[in-house]
Image: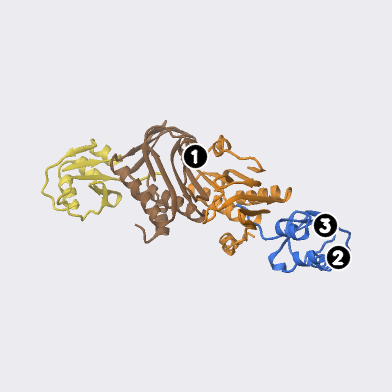
Chain colours: A yellow, B brown, C orange, D blue
């Protein structure tokens, strides 16, 4: 699964994307898995209310299932316009 | 309908040539400009985006506007990359038979662009760089268009 | 602030050159176009106005907008004389720090122009000529801006 | 006093403006005076609710006094924009 990071999430984790093999059932499970890896992930995912997630380029929820998903992206609330 | 995500500047007049449709009576445009900070110390605004999702999100927002109002034409352009104060960041344009639909649809497009299109702004000043925080009032503005989500 | 009443066509791009002010973050334009009738038989639209009062009324409406919203710039152009379908009749533009003020002020200007500036439209078709009747909904639209009158 | 007519008021009366010497105290008095002149005036002023009046180029009311006013204009509701 491709996992993408944008804005300060990208900066905290230190890379824009990575390939992750995971058995996580939901986005929240994936987040827990990442948090336990290293401090920089724990720092990036410290406050989920400050984060948004997209599943295959559509906004989703943290309790969404990952089955069949090929690309997950984490980022702060958007500030376009 | 035309949606563009680009690093290059755009020219409103060029983009508006031929905009509209037979029956168009009202055209509204909105242009966003990089505004300097209150202290005037902004060096640049860096805009990051999510290639692929950005185009899809803008097209989806424009399609929703077309479903909700009778629009003869819709245009959305949003830039990314490094911009300096005074530069144009983005624009939307709507064409309709009547002014109310053209105004409302442009207003709707802007509210959704602000909070639902994957762009992130970073302000660069002599003191450093800072990500622009999303504003509660921008999220609240979406409620005006409820039941859209 | 710039207000123009003219018979000649105008070019939106020319008019917008240099529009805005330091601190402008949002520019909204509205352009009105002569729309053909539903049956497509409109030959021309003749616009009569009240020289002297027209300029004063437009300036007054623009001034009210500036008193009500923080605007970096305001532009109003309205044509008179004989226009054909597809021609631009008029435009307004507003510049502000934030999008909400720019949108609201442009919407306000349009509502007031429609019902408070001394212009009268006459539709010319192969079947004859007819004065356009004022619409109740245009008058009602002014209530949105109450207590303005 | 200069009296101006626009749009279909002008067409019904058959001229865009005229100079009128009047002792009318209010706009309504002036309208009564004009109506009694000729049929074309009576036709133009048949329904005051379909008319607007401007006094010295400012919108006014039919009960407004004419003292000091130099220019009165009659016209249908405006249809700009």
Task: Specify whether residue B80 is in view.
Answer: no
Task: Specify whether residue D19 is in view.
Answer: yes
Disc nearest the viewer among 3 and 1: 3
Residue drawn at the location 25% of the way across and 48% of the way down: A54
Q: Mark 3 points at which residue?
A: D69
What x and y, as percent, mark residue D14?
A: 78, 57
Residue drawn at the location 89% of the way across and 59% of the way down: D21
Q: Residues within 10 Å of mark 3 (few under 14, many from 20)?
A: few
Rendered image: mark on residue B6: none
Provide the chain ID for the residue under circle 2. Answer: D
Secondary structure of the residue carrying tag 1 is loop
Residue drawn at the location 14% of the way across and 52% of the way down: A67
Task: Say yes or no: labels 3 and 1 on the same chain.
Answer: no
Secondary structure of the residue carrying tag 2 is loop
Q: Quadrant of the N terminus of chain D?
A: bottom right
What x and y, as percent, mark residue C52?
A: 74, 48
Provide the chain ID for the residue under circle 1. Answer: B
Q: Residues within 10 Å of mark 2 (few under 14, many from 20)?
A: some
Q: In this view, does A74 lie to the left or right of B99?
A: left
Marks 2 and 1, Cα distance to the nearest angstrom?
Answer: 59 Å
Residue drawn at the location 15% of the way across and 47% of the way down: A33
Provide the chain ID for the residue under circle 3. Answer: D
Secondary structure of the residue carrying tag 3 is loop
Disc nearest the viewer among 2 and 3: 2
Q: Name the residue under label 2.
A: D24
Marks 2 and 3, Cα distance to the nearest angstrom?
Answer: 11 Å
Of marks 2 and 3, which one's residue comes earlier in the chain? 2
| Residues at circles 2 and 1 in contact by the CB criterion of under 8 Å | no
Nearer to me, A68 or D29: D29
Q: Residues within 10 Å of mark 1 (few under 14, many from 20)?
A: few
Q: Mark 1 points at which residue?
A: B38
């Amino acid at each position: 699964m491709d996992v993408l990071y944008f804005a300060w999430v990208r900066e905290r984790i230190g890379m824009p994307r990575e390939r992750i093999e995971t058995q996580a059932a939901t986005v929240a499970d994936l987040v827990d898995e990442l948090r336990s890896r290293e401090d920089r992930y724990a720092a990036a995912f410290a406050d989920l209310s400050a984060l948004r997630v997209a599943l295959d380029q559509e906004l989703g929820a943290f309790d969404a299932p990952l089955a069949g998903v090929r690309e997950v992206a984490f980022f702060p609330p958007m500030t376009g316009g | 309908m035309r949606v563009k995500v680009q690093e290059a500047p755009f020219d409103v007049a060029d983009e508006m040539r031929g905009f509209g449709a037979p029956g168009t009576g009202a055209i509204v445009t909105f242009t966003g400009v990089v505004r300097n900070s209150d202290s005037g110390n902004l060096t640049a605004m860096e805009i990051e985006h999510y290639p692929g999702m950005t185009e899809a999100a803008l097209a989806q927002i424009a399609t929703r506007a077309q479903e909700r109002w009778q629009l003869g034409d819709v245009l959305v352009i949003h830039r990314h990359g490094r911009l300096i104060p005074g530069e144009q960041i983005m624009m939307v344009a709507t064409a309709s038979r009547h002014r109310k639909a053209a105004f409302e649809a442009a207003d709707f497009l802007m509210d959704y662009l602000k909070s639902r299109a994957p762009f992130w702004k970073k302000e660069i000043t002599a003191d450093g760089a800072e990500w622009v925080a999303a504003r509660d009032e921008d999220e609240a503005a979406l409620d005006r268009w409820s039941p859209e989500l």
